[in-house]
Image: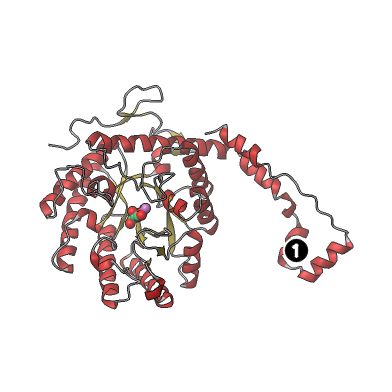
Amino acid sequence: MSYFKDIPPIQYEGPDSDNEFAYRHYDPNEVVMGKRMEDHLRLAVAYWHSLAYEGGDPFGGRTFERPWYGDDMAAARVKADAAFDMFGVLNVPFFCFHDADVRPEGDSFAESRRNLEEICDVFADKMQQTGTKLLWGTANMFTHRRWMAGAATNPDPEIFAYAAATVKACMDVTHRLGGENYVLWGGREGYESLLNTDLTREAEQAGAFLTKVVDYKHKIGFKGTILIEPKPQEPSKHQYDFDVGTIYGFLKRFGLENEVKLNIEQGHAILAGHSFEHELALAGSLGLLGSIDMNRNDYQSGWDTDQFPNNVPEVALAYYEVLRAGGFTTGGTNFDARVRRQSLDPEDLVLSHVGAIDICARGLKAAAAMLENGGLEKMRAERYAGWDNEASQAMLKSESLDQIAARVEETNLNPQPRSGRQERLENWVSRFV
Ligand code: XLS
Ligand code: NI
Ligand code: NI
C-alpha cells in the first residue's frame, strides 16, 4: 500500500482555501507572461532529499522510518514506487536523481552499473504511465570513501577512470530516460589542505574530464544541456566550482563556454558571499543560465542546510533574473531541499513541497508583474542613457586613453553625480512582493 495513501492529490484551490492539502497560488494552467505556470517553473522533486535522506546530521543518524530503506534492489523498487506516488500527489512534472540515490552499490563497477540500469527500466515504465519527466540526472561522486580526495581532480588516476565510467553510465541512463539536462556538481572537486594539493594538475584534470563529458554528449546525441553547479565549500574546504564567475573563467580556459551552462543554487550562492539574484544575473549576462536548485539556508548557521524556500521577496528577485534572461529552456526549478530531521511524517514530506511550490508561484507572479510593468528596466535604462549615443560608444570602441584625456580638458568636462535611487527602487519592488 502506498506510503502516501492518506494524502489526497494536491490541487489548486485558490488563496482563500482553508485546506492544508491544496495549492493556494500554484495553478499549473494559469498563464503568466504568455506561458502556463507549469511551463515557466518546471518544478522537480529531488530524489536524494525526499527519498534517500534518512534524517541524519553530524551528531546523530537516522530519525526517519521509511519502508524503502535498505541496500538491495528490492528496497530500491519500493523506493521508486514511493517516489512516483509522491510526484503524483504533488502533480510535479519533473524529478532529478543521482545514481546512488536510486540503486544499491554493487560489489564491482559493472554490478553498480547494472543495478542503475535495472532501476532506470522501472523509471522508464513509470514515466511512461504517469507522464513524469526527468529534469536531470547526475552522479554521486562524493559519498563513497573512494571519492574522499575528489573524482576528476583526484591525485590517483584510477579514481579519475572510475569517475569517467561513472559519469558515462549516468549520462547513458539520463539520455535513455529523455533527461533534459545532465548536472555535474563537483562534490569533492576541491581540497581539504593546500599542503598536499597540486592546483595546476587538478585544474588540468578537471578541464580534460569536462571536455570528455561534452564529447560524449555529442557522440551519443544527447540533446540536453550539460550543467555545472557552483558551490564554494562544503564538503571540501575549498571547491573549484566556487561561483558563477569562477566557472566562467574555467570554461573559457578550456574552450567550453558554449557547451556548458550552470545550475545555480540559492544556498550555494549565499555560501559564496553572494545573493541568489547576483549569481542568476551574472549567469544571465554571460549567457550561462541553465537551471536552478531552489532552497534556502538557515540564516544563522552558515551551512548549506537545504531548507525549503519560504521568502517571497527573495524568490521573486530570483525569478525576475530568470525571466529577464528569457526564462528556462531545458532548465527548471529543482527543490534541492529536505525536511528537518524532526519532520517524520509522510505529510511533512508532501506539505514541505506544497508550501515551497506556492512560494515559487508567488515569486514568479511578482517577478512577471515587475517585468511587465517595466519600472525597474525603465529606471535602469535612464541611468545608463548617457551611453546611448555615438560619441559615448566611440569612446568605448575607438578613442585612446590620451584622446579621451585631451577631450576632457578641451571641453572643460565637469560631471555631476546623480542619485542611484536605491531606496526608491526598493520601495518600487515592495509594491509587487
Ligand atoms: C549539494 C548539491 C547537490 C547537487 C547535486 O550541495 O546541491 O545536491 O545539487 O549533486
Ligand atoms: Ni544542488
Ligand atoms: Ni546544495
The amino acid pointed to by label 1 is: Met
Q: Nearer the viewer, residue 25 or 191?
A: 191
Q: In the rendered image, is residue 16 in sight?
A: yes
Q: Nearer the viewer, residue 123 or 159?
A: 159
Quadrant containing the N terminus in the rendered view: top left
> Percent position (x, y) of residue 174?
28, 58
Q: Residue at x 23, y 38 (%)?
A: 344
In the shown orientation, is residue 188 left or right of residue 232? left
- How crowded pointer 1 is (Cα within 10 Å; few <14, some 14-19, many 20+) is rated as some
Q: In the rendered image, is residue 180 in sight?
A: no
Give the total number of marks visible in the rendering: 1
Identify residue for label 1: 395
Q: Is residue 334 above or below residue 185?
A: above
Q: Quadrant of residue 31?
A: top left
Q: Quadrant of residue 11?
A: top left
Q: Residue at x 55, y 56 (%)?
A: 285
Q: Residue at x 39, y 71 (%)?
A: 206
Q: Residue at x 20, y 42 (%)?
A: 64
> Percent position (x, y) of residue 405?
81, 66
> Percent position (x, y) of residue 382?
70, 45
Label 1, secondary structure: give it: helix
Q: How is the image coloured?
A: secondary structure
> Percent position (x, y) of residue 237?
39, 63
Residue closest to the far front: 59
In the shown orientation, is residue 426 left or right of residue 142? right
Dividing the image into four quarters, tell me where ligand 1 lies: bottom left
Q: Nearer the viewer, residue 23 or 307?
A: 307
Q: Quadrant of residue 233?
A: bottom left
Callout 1: CB less than 8 Å from ligand 2 = no
